[in-house]
Image (cartoon, rainbow, N blue to C red):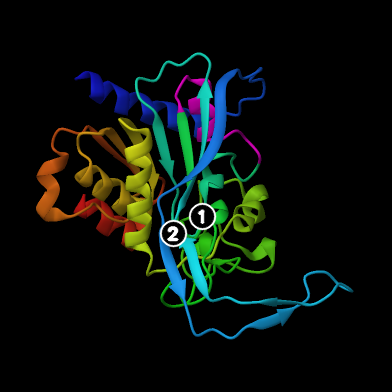
Amino acid sequence: MGFSGRIAVAILASGLAAGAARAEERGNLTLRDFGSFHVGGRLATLSGQPVKEIMLTPGGAPIKVDPNGNYIVESVYVQYFLPADRRGAYPLLMWHGGGLTGVEFENTPDGRPGWLDYFVRQGWDSYNSDAVERGRAGFPPPGVFQGDPMFVTQGRPFEQFRIGAGPGSWNDDPAKRRQLPGSQFPMEGYDNFIRQQSPRWVTTDEAILRGYIAEIDRVCPCVILYHIQAGQFGFRAAQARPDKVKALVAVEPSGFGEPDKAGLLKDIPTLVVYGDFIDQDAAGRRSAATG
């Protein structure tokens, strides 16, 4: 196995260990730097919108707000943690799944340290992102994104993400919920998982990809770890920048890039990881078969 291959295997082993271990005594963490930045985006212009009079503070004087003009939209937010004892050969970029933000890598829903904490402690320069239209990446005014955002009900992830036993397994009464036998999901943290759900659009894929490529151009060469919706972005970004992406770790990716450009990935070590009960998920089975 080559050097880059060992990098990918190390990432997978470290990540799975982090998900399973409850690190009760982690000690102090020393960083040489940390911070954040926004990257990518474009100018969007609104015109023909009515001027509105609003009150910013109860009891305050009303002001007129003219929504017409230029806006900077479709940027990606990136927060980075650079350990003092750097041991990872390349920076690690972490890209979240659909309806989520970079919070998914910070802590588990029941409060255990997440993959971000683990990788930084293992000496990896780690860059955790909120994609276009998520979290701290910001939102544009109405009319910039096409279509309406999607929102997630409390019960949908329980049935969709193989926590419960498929359609109909969720119930508003916790005693009547049918969790899959052997499920490792910490149900005491389920509502915390729901709290981090974010609205998403289905028309912003190209904007998200452009933002992630801008992050690669700023940070890389690097390794990319990505989840579900970000699967298509991870593979496509690597196809766009094969010289800058040194390894890929795809966690249940929902897409695998552009088939006619598959040859661009041949020299990039790639691991595709699936979780429990994947055989009970039709979408997951299609994804695994495609990969």
Q: Which residue is mark 2?
A: 74
Which residue is at the front of the view, 73 or 235? 73
- Crowding near the residue tagged with mark 1, few <14, some 14–19, many ≥20 C-alpha atoms within 10 Å: many
- Crowding near the residue tagged with mark 2, few <14, some 14–19, many ≥20 C-alpha atoms within 10 Å: many
Q: Quadrant of residue 8?
A: top left
Measured as percent of width and height from the top left, residue 132 is found at: 45, 57
Left or right? Give the position of 188 relative to 126.
Answer: right
224 w.r.t. 137: above or below: above
**Reading the chain from its start, which is encountered first: label 2 or label 1?**
2
Which residue is drawn at the image coordinates 57% and 75% (left, top)?
Answer: 67
Q: Which mark is residue 172?
A: none
Q: Quadrant of residue 42?
A: bottom left
Which residue is drawn at the image coordinates 54% and 84% (left, top)?
Answer: 49
Left or right? Give the position of 185 relative to 43.
Answer: right
119 w.r.t. 255: above or below: above
98 w.r.t. 22: above or below: below
Q: Tell whether position 116 is magenta.
A: yes
Tell me the magenta residue range: 111-125
User: What is the secondary structure assignment of the residue under circle 2?
Assistant: loop
Q: Amino acid at mark 2?
A: Glu
Q: Which residue is mark 1?
A: 100
Which residue is drawn at the image coordinates 67% and 69% (left, top)?
Answer: 172
User: What is the secondary structure assignment of the residue under circle 1?
Assistant: loop
Front disc: 2 or 1: 2
Measured as percent of width and height from the top left, residue 103 is found at: 56, 46
Pick out the residue farthest to the top.
Answer: 85
Q: In this rendering, does residue 144 appear at all?
A: no
Measured as percent of width and height from the top left, residue 117 is found at: 55, 30
Measured as percent of width and height from the top left, residue 114 is found at: 55, 35
Which residue is drawn at the image coordinates 49% and 60% (left, top)?
Answer: 99
Q: Tell whether position 11 is magenta.
A: no
Q: Amino acid at mark 1?
A: Leu
